[in-house]
Amino acid sequence: MKVLVSVIALCLAMASSAAHAEEEAAADKAATKADTAKPEAAQKTLMPMFKPTNLGAPMTRLGGATRSATGTVPRTEALVPEVPGHTLKAQPVLYWYLAGETDERIDFALIGVDPVNPMLEVTLEGPFEPGIQRIRLSDYDVTLEPDLDYQWFVRVIPNPDQRLYDRVVGGGIQRIEPTAELDAKLATAKRGEAHYALAEAGIWYDALDSLSIQIDASPENENLRAQRAALFDQVGLEDVN
């Protein structure tokens, strides 16, 4: 556990040193790219615009290296903004990405106020197919309290005896209460359009989950996939699909 905490602390310190001033410009650039680079059919659909309300907060997203030291771990990404993402839910769904199939051991940890003692630490059930992966906190009976900062990690372990080869990705999350304005927008949103209001209000996890549920129901819908890709582009995750 001490090794895990040390690695996490080092990674977070390195991530926090990046320039916050570049975030907003990068988001605008990515959004423009998403609008112009998508197929014509996709452009007919309004793209969601993610507007984080906590720009300038410490960066909490950890990304995996392109290739592991053992050469066996596919690229992995935490599908989160660089700063902590917000949710309205007590038991949100967390998303991460795996570029290739693997049967390596993968652990998940959720850390709250006490970084030494995780709220949850489990080994996920594999083998794992490539693509976007989900972790439902409701599956583990874990609840987030409002206005507290949490950090979650997915840890790919190619060699349990040599933990320096582990690949760690993760991100920050905070549960907040909706504003009266957001409540009103959600109450009047048309079916399948709540993610627009959620993204505009900076509620990353719920906007992504809403879109992903719709994609599950209509996997051939290219417009929905283009909207999710636009969200990823806006937080610097252009290579995820």
Image (tube, helix red, strand yellow):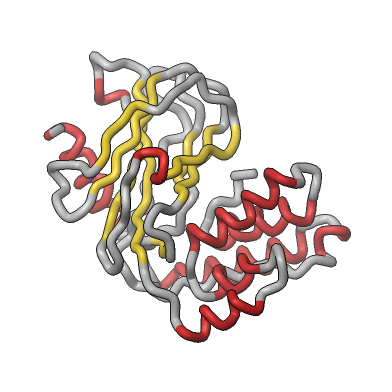
Quadrant location, the C terminus = top right
State the image coordinates of residue 67 (x, y, percent, origin top left): 46, 28
Residue 201 to residue 68: above or below: below
Residue 221 versus residue 187 in the image, above or below = above
Q: Residue at x 51, y 60 (%)?
A: 206
Name, please, the residue furthest toward the right: 40
For residue 105, side relative to residue 116 (left or right)? right
Instruction: Please tell me which residue lies in front, 135 or 200.
Output: 135
Residue sitting at 68 percent across and 44 percent down? 216
Eyeballing the image, is 98 above or below 79?
A: above
Q: Nearer the viewer, residue 221 or 160?
A: 221
Q: Nearer the viewer, residue 163 or 213?
A: 213
Residue lying at 62% horizontally and 50% vertically, measured from the top left: 212
- Residue 38 relative to residue 148: left or right: right
Indicate whether 107 appears above or below 241: above
Residue 60 position in % (x across, y down)? 33, 55
- Drawn side of residue 221 relative to residue 7, left or right: right
Quadrant where the image shows the N terminus:
top left
For this view, does 2 lie left or right of residue 147?
A: left
Name the residue: 25% across, 64% down: 148
Closest to the observer: 110 or 74?
110
Where is residue 130 drawn, in percent x and y? Answer: 59, 29
Residue at the limit of the structure toward the bottom, as seen here? 181
Could you say where residue 22 lies in the image, as x and y percent from the top left? 45, 69
